[in-house]
Image (spheres, rainbow, N blue to C red):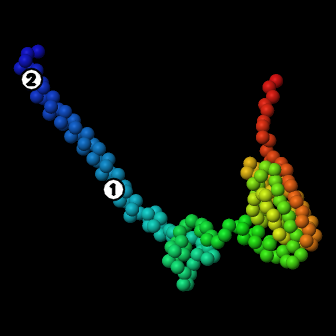
Amino acid sequence: MSSLQMSASKKLLVPAQAAAFALLCCAFASTLHGQAVAETAGANSVSASVASSIKPPTMPKFPGTGSGASSSAASASSSSPHLIASAGPPAEESNRKSLEATAGKDAGKILLRATPVEAQIWVNGKIVGKTPLLLLVAPGKYQIEMRGSRGQTGRRSVDLLPRETRELAVELDQLYPGRVVAATH
């Protein structure tokens, strides 16, 4: 090819590329326009009006979170969808104090120990603390359960006489085996 023909073909190549680009833009613009029409129709359709008429979920009212002359912190927390942690003492402390408050003048003492140490202690289904612990309780029968940090448990029943002191040492049993051995044949 001569140099004249090459320069002419180069000049034609640039407008041909521009024309192809314009053709692609027009093709995609029509699909974008179609999508905009579909979205607009969806916003104006019956199903969209039904969806917009759905009531928002209501949150239950928790006791102590609020009405009347409550502080602004309490009213702010009542609008929160999260559970509210109580500002009082932990459950184990209040349960232990409740047991000791009903002990009376003939109170007995139970010294609770567990192996392994620092097991949670449950008396009649209520948590009262961790081992080792000395409890002052009214005379009577108590169901003691201890739970270790790795799922170990131990249960005992204690019958306490007036002014009696008793030590209860519990060896916690594994809930699951500590080691599993696979046998091959």
> Between residues 180 and 89, which one lies in front from this camera angle?
89
In front: 159, or 107? 107
Which picture quadrant has residue 157?
bottom right
Q: Residue at x 39, y 62 (%)?
A: 43
The x, y position of residue 2, in whole percent, is 8, 16
- The disc placed on residue 37 is 1
Q: Residue drawn 68% across and 67% down? A: 90
- In the picture, the quarter occupied by the N terminus is top left
Up/down of 183 relative to 5, above or below:
below
Whether tag 2 and tag 1 are in contact, CB under 8 A, the answer is no
Q: Nearer the viewer, mark 2 or mark 1?
A: 2
Residue 125 shows up from this direction: no
Q: Position of residue 127 (x, y in %)?
A: 76, 64
Query: Callout 1, which amino acid?
Result: Val
Q: CA distance from mark 2 to mark 1?
A: 46 Å
The percent position of residue 73, horizontal first and vertical second, equals: 52, 74
In the shown orientation, is residue 46 left or right of residue 25?
right
Does residue 102 appear anywhere in the picture?
A: yes
| Coordinates of residue 119 in the picture (x, y in percent) | 76, 55
Tell me which label, 2 or 1, sits earlier in the chain. Answer: 2
125 sits left or right of 7 in the view: right
Query: Which quadrant of the figure contains the C terminus?
Result: top right
Horizontally, is 141 left or right of 37 in the view? Answer: right
Q: In percent of the image, x 18 and y 36: which residue is there?
A: 18
In the depicted view, which residue is nearer to us: 80 or 158? 158
**Residue picked out by circle 2:** 7
Residue extending farthest to the left is 4
For label 2, count other residues whose C-alpha is less than 10 Å away and answer few (under 14), some (14-19) or many (20+).
few
Mark 1 surroundings: few (<14), some (14-19) or many (≥20) residues within 10 A? few
Q: What element does badge 2 sit on?
A: helix
Amino acid type, mark 2: Ser
Q: Secondary structure at mark 1?
A: helix
